[in-house]
Image (spheres, rainbow, N blue to C red):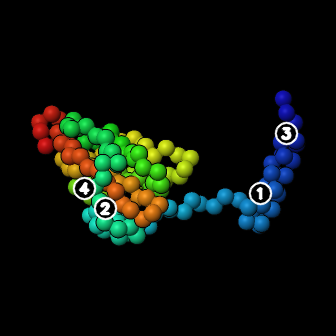
Amino acid sequence: MTNPLNRRMALARSAQVALMLGGLGLLPRAALAAYPTAAFEAKTIADLMKALGAGAPVESKDVTVTAPDIAENGAVVPVGASTSLPGAKRLLLLVEKNPSVLSAAFDVNEFVEPSFTTRVKMGQSSNVLAVALMADGRVLYAQKEVKVTLGGCGG
């Protein structure tokens, strides 16, 4: 059993250290958003590209989107994005007919393989796009139509 006095002293010392670190600005701060708010509010692909400061995307067979042809549950649709090209700096997953077109964004560097999978929510049948933002400024994409059924009744 530990001595309550020792515990109190340790807590007091910890508080002193935290105050000192805070005064020096060495404590972690709240995370800042890595993307502009306008990117999350974009309703169209053109608006999203403008918010990210990127050009118009060009279709490429070097970018791959993976998604089912038919999603029985639009609440959890497995999707993925990847590229075989070197120099990718960000991969995006977009759902064209969602209220906010940007569903996921992944930052990439030379130490990270540009291949990601996740699950997104889809309210209706739509095109799903994998977009690769390249270091040289190119914006490449691949797309696939995903049909969303509601309770197996079609959609």
Quarter of the image for the C terminus: give it.
top left
From this view, report whether residue 81 is shown above or below residue 48.
Answer: above
What's the amino acid at mark 4?
Answer: Glu
Which residue corresponds to the image point at 35% horizontal and 48% vertical from the top-left? Answer: 62
First in residue order: circle 3 vs circle 1: 3
* Left or right: 112 in relation to 48: right
* Left or right: 62 in relation to 2: left
The Cα atoms of the two marked residues, 3 and 2, are separated by: 64 Å
First in residue order: circle 4 vs circle 1: 1
Q: To which residue does mark 1 refer? A: 18
What's the amino acid at mark 3?
Answer: Pro
User: Comparing marks 3 and 2, which lies closer to the viewer?
Assistant: 2
Q: Pointer 3: residues within 10 angstroms few (<14), some, or many (20+)?
A: few
Q: Residue furthest top?
A: 1
Q: Give the SS element for disc 2.
A: loop
Q: Pointer 1: residues within 10 angstroms few (<14), some, or many (20+)?
A: some
* Left or right: 5 in relation to 90: right
User: Could you say which disc has been placed on residue 4 in the image?
Assistant: 3
Res. 43 in view: no
Residue 140 picture location, percent across and down = 34, 57
From this view, report whether residue 111 is shown above or below residue 33.
Answer: above
Which residue corresponds to the image point at 49% horizontal and 44% vertical from the top-left? Answer: 113
The Cα atoms of the two marked residues, 4 and 3, are separated by: 60 Å
The Cα atoms of the two marked residues, 2 and 4, are separated by: 14 Å
Q: To which residue does mark 2 refer? A: 57
From this view, report whether residue 75 is shown above or below residue 137.
Answer: above
First in residue order: circle 1 vs circle 2: 1
